[in-house]
Amino acid sequence: MIIDTHAHLNFNSFKDDWNELINKSLDNNIWMINVGSQYTTSRRAVEIANHYEKGVWAALGLHPLQLETGLVKIKTDKEEAEFPTREEKLDYQKYKELAKSPKVVAIGEIGLDYYWKPKTKKRLLAFKDKQKAVLYEQLKLASELNLPVIFHCRVAHQDLIDFLTLIINKKELKIKGVMHGFVGTVEQLDKYLEMGFYIGFNGIIFKKIEGINFEENIKKTPLDKILLETDCPYLTPPDFPEERNNPLGVKFVAEQVAKIKKINPEEIAEITTKNAKTLFKLKF
């Protein structure tokens, strides 16, 4: 068994065949967590999970790129939402109510993303502050509900590290979770591991990104801190037979991680399944 800890079959890209692909994945002993990016996709993740007795769970949260800031215009991703959606203000109680479902196992994906950003210093500072304020509110929700967090971070690792360090040092909230699709330096990896976070690896490890050494990051991450994911429909592994990624692609990630760790893929599958079960308190 392998658990894809970060899939998006709740997205528009799978609106016509999510059931077929999930059944195919389950038949291949691949279980999954579908992750929300705003209220609509979070609700959809829960609805999909409710179709299955086992093997499919949901995470809910407001992604930083879906947050209403009034400071930058974000491009709508047609793979994510069927119709252009308004940027969203966080409704704490609405998300809390949705999280009552026993199928919800995490708050996410939430975090910081400075890829699209204002150009002036004043607006950029306000933009970052708004993202951090909403991230803090969602961390409060996770702490209140005793749920782990699925962190998204792009072009913002140092800010996220400083932000989380301050919260952890003050012992304000109980934070546990995973750095989804980690793209950072070895030094940043060390900081997250010191905080006790898991590290998620997906198809991006097959790419070459300046300043990032995926092989070294995988080598340095302890086996008991690794989670596998696809982030489907995105980040399709190079040898995957389809252009659109799906949970079956997690096997290719497992094989690459196993190769770098110099162990067999079956062992990686067993260890990462145990890790997912531990972090997300999965019952099976």
Image: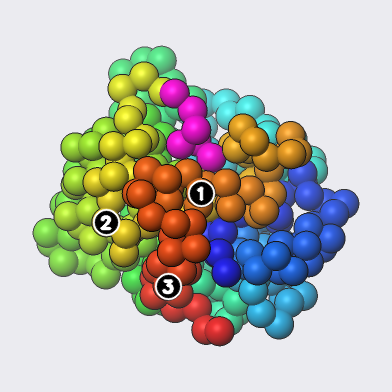
Instruction: Between residue 190 and residue 271, name the one nearer to us.
Output: 271
Which residue in the structure is indicated by mark 2? 222
Give the Cα separation between the discs numbered 1 and 2: 16 Å
- Looking at the image, which residue is at 12% across and 59% down? 169
Q: Where residue 110 sits in the image (x, y, percent)?
A: 45, 51
Chosen colour scheme: rainbow
Which residue in the structure is indicated by mark 3? 274
Give the Cα separation between the discs numbered 2 and 3: 14 Å
Instruction: Between residue 70 and residue 80, name the one nearer to us.
Output: 80
**Disc 2 element:** loop
Q: Earlier in the sequence, mark 1 or mark 3?
A: 1
Q: Where residue 229 sits in the image (x, y, percent)?
A: 53, 52
**Disc 3 element:** helix
The reply, left or right, for residue 235 in relation to residue 181 is: right
Q: Where residue 185 sits in the image (x, y, percent)?
A: 27, 33
- Indicate which disc residue 255 carries: 1
